[in-house]
């Protein structure tokens, strides 16, 4: 980006606007986009072999530790839509605490809805800034310098018996959004809990808003983080949306019907 472009973008931000990046539309494929991939077929479209197959989770203790995963907002939002829920997408899942909370709520409501968990399992910026932080950097469970926390996530799902409901998608949020769009997938609930940096959160909002099903909800965590709050406020302002709060979560309602 040249100096002039950066100047225009900076001035636009100061005035309360943003210069949105354009997303190239992925090529449609016969039999894929029209009607969209059903929620119960997403797992087999992503994984030739079931990721839980042959995984020995017995060597892992149940450890869904995280942040905000026990919020009553999950059960409230799910309870309001239990009779029509087909798919929940979670962007940023860590050890799966919130996904398991939602899976338990779905089970209690008698819903067959699936949960697609999108994460690189590499950790956000703050996981790499303090090497002595036992929760964040320590939680990465590095092996030869590479995070292995993904396997703790799998183990946690197995311990709770949700293998048939929770589908892992180890990918960046941007690429995962392109995959969902290419396959005509829209979700009734989309939970954003990945980056805490303003541009990263804003990019996720832009990528996932049009993947929310009509009448669905885009919601997220960490309103107390400046980057998250500023991104949500900017996106809501640009799209003439009201921000409401459900317990500790911010919520954007998709009114398209």
Image (spheres, rainbow, N blue to C red):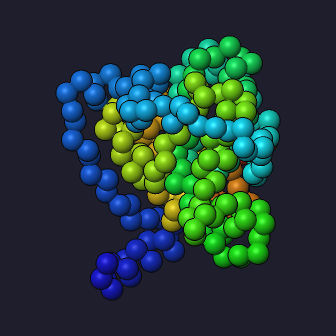
Residue 114 place in picture, x, y as percent: 56, 26
Residue 117 place in picture, x, y as percent: 55, 41
Q: Is residue 78 among what the camera can see?
A: no
Q: Identify the residue at horizontal 69%, vertical 26% (top origin).
A: 161
Residue 84 location, quadrant: top right
Q: Is residue 155 among what the camera can see?
A: yes
Residue 193 place in picture, x, y as percent: 62, 51
Q: Identify the residue at horizontal 37%, vertical 80% (top origin).
A: 6
Q: Identify the residue at horizontal 53%, vertical 40% (top origin).
A: 168
Residue 169, above or below 1: above
Give the side of residue 126 with respect to residue 207, left or right.
right
Observer-nearest residue: 181 or 14?
181
Report how many numbered discs are placed on residues in the image.
0
Residue 12 location, quadrant: bottom left
Image quadrant holding the N terminus, namely bottom left
Residue 204, above or below 257: below
Residue 169, above or below 19: above
Residue 36 place in picture, x, y as percent: 35, 26
Observer-nearest residue: 30 or 240?
30
Q: Identify the residue at horizontal 21%, vertical 33% (top origin).
A: 29
Give the side of residue 224 with respect to residue 117, left or right.
right
């Amino acid at each position: 980006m040249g100096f002039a472009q950066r100047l225009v973008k900076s001035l636009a931000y100061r005035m309360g606007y943003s210069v949105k990046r354009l997303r190239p539309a992925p090529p449609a494929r016969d039999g894929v986009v029209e009607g969209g991939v059903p929620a119960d077929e997403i797992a087999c479209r992503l994984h030739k072999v079931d990721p839980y197959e042959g995984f020995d989770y017995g060597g892992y203790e149940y450890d869904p530790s995280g942040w905000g995963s026990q919020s009553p907002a999950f059960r409230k939002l799910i309870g309001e839509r239990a009779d029509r829920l087909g798919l929940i997408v979670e962007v940023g899942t860590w050890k799966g605490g919130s996904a398991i909370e939602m899976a338990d709520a779905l089970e209690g409501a008698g819903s067959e809805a699936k949960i697609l968990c999108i994460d690189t399992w590499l950790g956000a910026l703050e996981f790499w800034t303090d090497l002595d932080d036992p929760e964040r950097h320590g939680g990465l469970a590095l092996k030869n310098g590479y995070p292995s926390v993904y396997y703790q996530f799998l183990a946690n799902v197995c311990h709770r018996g949700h293998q048939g409901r929770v589908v892992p998608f180890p990918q960046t949020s941007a690429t995962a959004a392109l995959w969902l769009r290419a396959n005509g997938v829209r979700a009734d609930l989309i939970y954003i809990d990945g980056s805490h940096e303003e541009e990263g959160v804003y990019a996720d909002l832009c990528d996932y808003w049009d993947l929310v099903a009509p009448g669905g909800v885009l919601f997220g965590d960490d309103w107390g983080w400046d980057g998250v709050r500023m991104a949500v406020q900017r996106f809501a302002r640009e799209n003439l949306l009201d921000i409401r709060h459900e317990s500790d979560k911010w919520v954007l309602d998709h009114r398209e019907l």
